[in-house]
């Protein structure tokens, strides 16, 4: 059995996977996950800065601080799940497109 290596420029047209258009739901998931993760990281840094400036535990219970403290707790895992869902949807769509061609 001979082992021949093929260079990328030696590909046949049938070897190429066709380009799959990006759907609206994919854009929504991607931008929402990015925004949620970014906001969670900013809130995390806000808590670090608030603690470093001398805020007490009681001060974090008033105003917008409960929301700021809760966003990283729920936002980062939710953004991770959204990215995993986006990857799965992309793999399935590309697999179906490859079967059709």
Image (cartoon, rainbow, N blue to C red):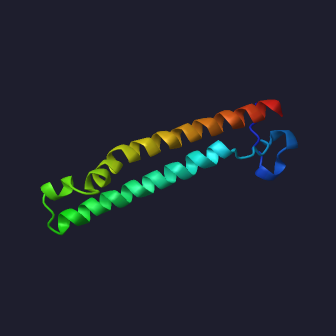
- Can residue 57 be spotted in the picture? no
- Can residue 81 be spotted in the picture? yes
Residue 70 location, x and y as percent? 31, 48
Front in this rendered view, residue 1 or 18:
18
**Quadrant assignment for the N terminus:** top right
Front in this rendered view, residue 38 or 61:
61
Front in this rendered view, residue 101 or 72:
72
Residue 3 location, x and y as percent? 74, 37
- Asked whether, in this view, residue 15 is left or right of residue 76, the answer is right
At a point 44% along the width and 52% down the height, the residue shown is 37
Residue 83 location, x and y as percent? 52, 43
At a point 45% along the width and 51% down the height, the residue shown is 36
Residue at the right extreme, as displayed: 13
Residue 10 location, x and y as percent? 83, 48
At a point 50% along the width and 53% down the height, the residue shown is 34
Q: Quadrant of residue 52?
A: bottom left
**Quadrant assignment for the C terminus:** top right
């Amino acid at each position: 059995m001979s082992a021949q290596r093929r260079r990328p420029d030696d590909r046949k047209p049938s070897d190429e996977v066709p380009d799959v258009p990006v759907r609206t739901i994919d854009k929504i998931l991607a931008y929402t996950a990015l925004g949620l993760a970014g906001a969670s990281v900013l809130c995390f840094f806000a808590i670090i800065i608030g603690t470093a400036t001398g805020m007490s535990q009681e001060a974090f219970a008033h105003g917008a601080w409960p929301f700021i403290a809760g966003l990283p707790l729920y936002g980062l895992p939710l953004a991770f799940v959204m990215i995993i869902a986006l990857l799965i949807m992309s793999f399935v769509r590309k697999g179906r497109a490859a079967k059709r061609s």
